[in-house]
Image: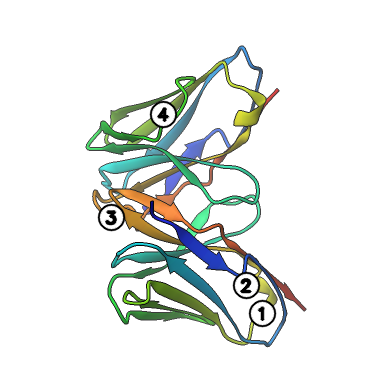
Amino acid sequence: DTEVTQTPKHLVMGMTNKKSLKCEQHMGHRAMYWYKQKAKKPPELMFVYSYEKLSINESVPSRFSPECPNSSLLNLHLHALQPEDSALYLCASSQVNWVGEAFFGQGTRLTVV
Amino acid sequence: ELKVEQNPLFLSMQEGKNYTIYCNYSTTSDRLYWYRQDPGKSLESLFVLLSNGAVKQEGRLMASLDTKARLSTLHITAAVHDLSATYFCAVDRDDKIIFGKGTRLHILP
């Protein structure tokens, strides 16, 4: 199984809503990542988890809250988002220290209204 | 600051032609990656180049790495419409991937 599964595929939320994005992999990867991608731009790293511990936070606003409950799951909790947060959110996983050999999920297309 | 620069950023070409996308990066790294992304889709890993002089080929795509020049190329041979996509190169540093801006490749039938 070489898949990274993200749910939901699409999400529309209001600025006062709380929602969560989910990501799952069963490849035994101990590094997991959240990226944000705006249209016609490259992905931007948000968070890195290594061995279920947050190792990198790229100065992401606190309205985005990551969580790694176990080695297979990664969540991104969303609260009080702004319209400019609308984007494609990509989850990825890899072996630790092999960040470039990551498998990416299909993404969640988020629209904040 | 690590910078990754791709050129061209947009390329429209006829089927059957050859072309090369260039990726320059600003600091030492022995690992360079190429990804493909179709519109609205996720990233697909194409090539992992791990050392100076590395060359990898898959179908009509060939990637190479010159770490001394800090340059990687992605060469397209006899392009076909199915290769239309955005291609990103990326370099890793300190457990992060730094992506280039991407090259939007449009192949005309």
Label 3: chain? Answer: A
Label 2: chain? Answer: B
Please, what secondary structure does the residue beneath circle 2 have? Answer: helix
Residue annotated with mark 2: B83
- Asked if marks 3 and 2 fall on the same chain, the answer is no
| Mark 2: few/some/many CA within 10 Å (<14, 14-19, 20+) | some
Contact check, label 2 and label 1, Cβ < 8 Å = yes
| Mark 4: few/some/many CA within 10 Å (<14, 14-19, 20+) | some
Label 1: chain? Answer: B
Label 4: chain? Answer: A
Please, what secondary structure does the residue beneath circle 1 have? Answer: loop
Camera-side mark, 3 or 2? 3
Q: In the image, is B108 to the left or to the right of A10? A: right
Q: In the image, is B105 to the left or to the right of A95? A: right
Please, what secondary structure does the residue beneath circle 4 have? Answer: strand
Q: Nearer the viewer, residue B75 or A70?
A: B75
Cα distance between the residues tagged 2 and 4? 33 Å
Residue annotated with mark 1: B80
Q: Looking at the image, is mark 4 or mark 3 earlier in the sequence?
A: 4
| Mark 3: few/some/many CA within 10 Å (<14, 14-19, 20+) | some
Q: Nearer the viewer, residue B54 or B23?
A: B23
Residue annotated with mark 3: A98
Disc 1 marks which amino acid?
Val
Residue annotated with mark 4: A75
Residue A38: x and y, percent?
A: 61, 43
